[in-house]
Image (cartoon, rainbow, N blue to C red):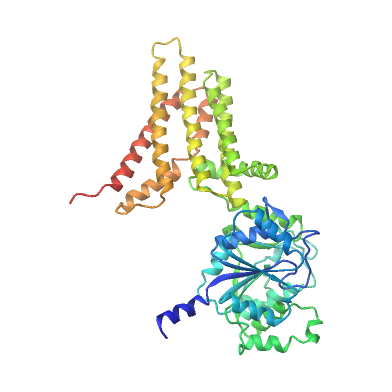
Amino acid sequence: MSQSALQRFAQTRELTSAILLTARNVFTPTPVSVHTGISPLTRIAGVTIFQRGLLTLQRAGVNQIFVLAGDEAETLKAVVRDGPPITAGIRWIPVREFPLDDPRTWETLAADAKGACLVIGPQAAFSRNLIETLRGQGPIEDLTLVLQPEDRRRIGPGQSDRAGRVDRAVPTKRDRLARLAAIGLGGERGAQEGFTGRLAAELMVLPAGLFSKGQPLADSLLAQSGEEQRAEGDPLLSRLVELAAAERRIRIVEAAPDANLWARDVHDAGDASAVERDLYRSLKGHFEGIVDRYFNRKLSPFFTKLFLKLKLSPNAITVAATLIGLAGAACFGMGTYAAGLLGALLFQLAAVIDCCDGEVARLTFTESPLGAKLDLVLDNVVHMAVFAGIAYGAYQAHAASEQAWLYLALGAVAVIFNALACWLVTRLAAHPGAPAGASTARWKWTDFLLKNIATRDFSMVVLLFAAIGRLDWFLLLAVIGSTLFGLVLIWLVFSARSPRVA
């Protein structure tokens, strides 16, 4: 076989396509309407389930999406037009002409997909990491399901687990499919009597060529597709799982929400809240320190939810955080203890709000280079204003002293080196990664400085010094810190780019 033929063969087994169902689930015959209850149009963290699915697939590398829709197609198309841009190819397939329980529908779709294909239900929400994990498995030869492990030792009949699901004496169809899938996997865990995994969501991966003529599973499914089998109410893909389990053609990926590897079906408000928690857990900025991680990020979701309800754009939130920070800087300039403490509290609030612009952008898929640059520049405007305000406040408090001008000089030095550092960090942020010829160790130091020092963490230090009434001490530390940081950045950046002399 030639190299080009081998490449085409490998590509047909890559996962680059997805099929989204909008009116009925994958494994159960339950209909879903966009006009009642939880539907593809239900908004979670500012974005509909349907949009979030499309955009998550796109960002995970899926470039071809088939949407099997009924009467709701026009409504969903309008949602797509009005939302964030989608560059992946979308084909709208009328479910009237392509019934879900007709094997010929899946044979046609599989041929068009030209490779392995995701099939996703209308109420399924999932993480980008999960899709990337499914895509990163290599050539997909077997039917793949996502199972959520459960520990039933924690719950009894009639009681609910942490996800709000009630232990059932009579297993549901999905429970039985999960059990069959685990046994079909052939491992010890799957064969254990006490296996308690469940299907994480109405989501599966079909391997390439599964519905091709001559495939044993396809032939068996075709033999079962008479009216007598359809009358039982089992969807075609549900029967496919049973057949694949019997043939040991099952692969399982375990969901792990703590590792941002999750999928959930949204049936009620409790499920929507669980998805929202998973989404917030995954949020993290690029330049983030300890205070951000363990304090600011704990408070920011409360404000982020408010901003999402108000439909504020990320850039509007950036400006709001800047105005709060500038108000804090003005308080510092008054030179009194009370004003200094109020200024520190406002500065800390600005640091919390400053987390929200990125959170809203990531939750609503509205990140942009302009927004990132605006955030970085305005952050540093606030920092420089804070240094200037503290310097002027210290000057005011010590106006009677002949050395009072020193505070203004210290403030000027802090502002100048902060501006220099801002310029360097902006250049680095615009061109991430080590430049050609740069020392790896030296560039690691640069990356460490950006992620651990160029952060909002010093807002807590300002609050501490304001609480003890010694903001002038902080000013001295700020001068030393900003000067050293600026000089080290200059050395790291420009020495990394300069050619070595032999």
Q: Is residue 455 left or right of residue 360?
A: left
Taking the spot 71% from the left edge, 89% from the top edge, the residue there is 223
Q: Nearer the viewer, residue 223 or 394?
A: 223
Camera sees residue 187? no
x%, y% of residue 165? 75, 62
Q: Is residue 39 above or below residue 432?
A: below
Looking at the rendered image, the quarter that the N terminus falls into is bottom left
- The residue furthest top is 400
Query: In x, y percent, where is residue 443?
Result: 35, 49
Task: Say if 318 sits above or below 24 in the image.
Answer: above
Q: Is residue 23 visible?
A: yes
Picture quarter containing residue 207?
bottom right
The x and y percentages for residue 317 are 60, 39
The residue shown at (46%, 25%) is 388
In the image, residue 94 sits, relative to residue 471, either above or below, namely below
Question: Picture quarter containing residue 37?
Answer: bottom right
Could you tell me which residue is drawn at 79 percent across and 68 percent down? 31
**Front-most of residues 64 and 478:** 64
Number of marks: 0
Residue 170 or 232: which is nearer the viewer?
Answer: 232
Q: Residue lying furthest left in this view?
A: 502
Q: In the displayed structure, does residue 442 sit left or right of residue 430?
A: left
- Rendered residue at 41%/84% (across/down): 2
- Measured as percent of width and height from the top left, residue 432 is found at 41, 50
Residue 47 vertical placement versus 423 (above, below): below
